[in-house]
């Protein structure tokens, strides 16, 4: 009886092991695909962020350059020294105030852009991260189930072998 029970149990346990392996292969494949997609999307966002930062920096530098190039050359103006110094101080103060205002505007714009960019990144990446986490949990669950099913298979295999030994006829005449 142990032989038949072991053989049937081994057959069913083997079927369960193969079924779990099949499911695990599918989950692992989907997990790799989702992980790759999330990584690619993260790289894309990082590249966009670098490009946008560079563009904003260039715009700020261009604005600063445009503002400084608007200042006339003092040697060409032909104003007396004291008047020239007063005019120079006023121009310098105006330049400093304007440059600070431009820098402040660009910082505010950059903060707004950064917040919007992070919201977009979060909205697009979070579903992939959630799916990746779910698939990882499924994979861990299937691996655990596979380990248990494999142990059950090995136990049924041993039961079958022990049952086969007990079925062998005793030719010694001593009984058994």
Image (tube, rainbow, N blue to C red):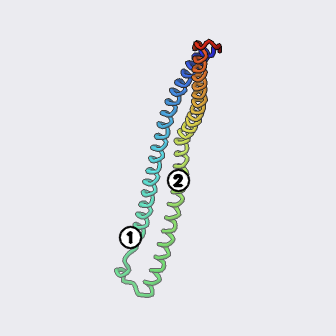
Residue behind mark 2: 114
Q: Which residue sits furthest left?
A: 76
Q: Residue at x 55, y 46 (%)?
A: 119
Q: CA distance from mark 2 to mark 1?
A: 30 Å
Q: Could you tell me how many numbered marks the image carries?
A: 2
Where residue 4 sits, quadrant-wise, is top right
The quarter of the rendered structure image containing the C terminus is top right
- Tag 1 or tag 2, which sits nearer the N-term? 1
Percent of width and height locating residue 71: 40, 73
Q: Relative to 108, is 141 above or below?
A: above
The disc placed on residue 69 is: 1
Left or right, 123 with reference to 76: right
Percent of width and height locating residue 120: 52, 45
Q: Relative to 68, is 139 above or below?
A: above
**Secondary structure under the numbered disc 1 in the rendered image:** helix
Percent of width and height locating residue 76: 34, 80
Where residue 74 sits, quadrant-wise, is bottom left
Q: Nearer the viewer, residue 12 or 89?
A: 12
The disc placed on residue 52 is: none
Q: Residues within 10 Å of mark 1 (few under 14, many from 20)?
A: few
Q: Relative to 70, is 40 above or below?
A: above
Q: Residue at x 54, y 38 (%)?
A: 132
């Amino acid at each position: 009886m142990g032989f038949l029970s072991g053989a049937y149990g081994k057959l069913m346990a083997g079927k369960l092991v193969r079924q779990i392996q099949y499911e695990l292969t599918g989950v692992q494949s989907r997990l790799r695909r989702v992980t790759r997609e999330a990584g690619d999307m993260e790289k894309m966002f990082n590249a966009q962020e670098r490009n946008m930062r560079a563009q904003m920096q260039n715009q700020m530098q261009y604005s600063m350059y445009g503002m400084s190039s608007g200042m006339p050359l003092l040697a060409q103006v032909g104003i007396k020294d004291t008047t020239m110094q007063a005019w120079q101080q006023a121009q310098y103060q105006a330049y400093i105030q304007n440059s600070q205002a431009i820098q402040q505007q660009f910082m505010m714009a950059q903060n707004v852009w950064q917040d919007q960019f992070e919201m977009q990144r979060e909205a697009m990446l979070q579903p992939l991260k959630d799916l990746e986490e779910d698939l990882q949990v499924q994979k861990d669950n299937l691996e655990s189930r596979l380990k248990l099913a494999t142990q059950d298979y090995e136990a049924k295999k041993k039961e079958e072998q022990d049952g086969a030994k007990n079925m062998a006829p005793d030719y010694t005449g001593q009984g058994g």
